[in-house]
Image (cartoon, grey):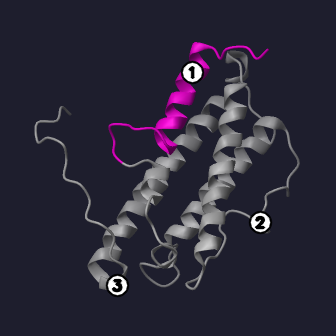
Amino acid sequence: MARAPSPQIIQLLAFVDAAYDHRSWHGPNLRGSLRGVTPMQAAWRPAPKRHNIWELAVHAAYWKYVAVRRLAGARRGSFTLKGSNWFEREAGGTATEWRADLELLEQSHRTFRDVVANLTPRDLPRKPAGAEFDTFGLVSGVAAHDLYHAGQIQLVKRLMRTSNAELRTEPEHEPRSENREV
């Protein structure tokens, strides 16, 4: 029988969840920022030599894999795709390819979350092999990484709407209230 996570791990999981796929006050998380994006939109580049949404999604999947590998002590080179960090995705990708890369992100996240759920408070100050930061920093860094790229994706979608009528996404929702506390 699996043990229940400690309060510290539950809190870390809350950060991980809010950054990836749970509702939170800050607006779209990573998965939410990708919702409804078509392959054509995902492959659109805001400028030459700039990353597109598709590449940002695969990049996020890769770094979740790296965190899992470091936390679990797994071997290098076991990521599904050849290469590391950035994986070029050009225009012309199919819906099947886009869905496969979104599923790669989803699976990478589930694996990462499972590894985090099995940590103990004693693991948090330890520095995993090959990591620059302790376990707490690595896990919270993955959550921050998700939010950073969610923001980039939202920005790319906004740039896309202003520059290409055929790629326009749905308009964003207005804030719920002008009287939001800060």
Please report the residue visible at 20 percent of the width from the left and 34 percent of the height from the top.
182
Q: Residue pushed farthest right?
A: 75
Q: Does the magenta stretch include residue 12?
A: yes
Q: Which of marks 1 and 3 is in front?
A: 3
Q: Which mark is residue 10?
A: 1
* Dot 1 alpha-carbon crowd within 10 angstroms: few under 14, some 14 to 19, many 20 or more: some
Three-letter amino acid code of the residue under disc 1? Ile
Horizontal arrangement in the rendering, residue 126 relative to residue 146 (left or right): right
Q: Which of marks 1 and 3 is nearer the N terminus?
A: 1
Point out residue 160 in the picture as x, y percentages from the top left corner: 35, 76
The residue positioned 65% from the left and 36% from the top of the image is 113
Q: Which of 134 and 32 lies nearest the eye of the viewer?
A: 32
The residue that disc 2 covers is 81
Report if residue 33 is visible in the image: yes
Looking at the picture, tell me which residue is in the foreground, 125 or 108: 108
Label 2 sits on a secondary structure element that is loop
Three-letter amino acid code at disc 2? Leu
Magenta residues, as a range? 1-27
Where does label 3 land, which residue?
166
Numbered disc in front, either 3 or 2? 3
Q: Do the residues labelled 3 and 2 touch (CB within 8 Å)?
A: no
View extreme (front): residue = 96
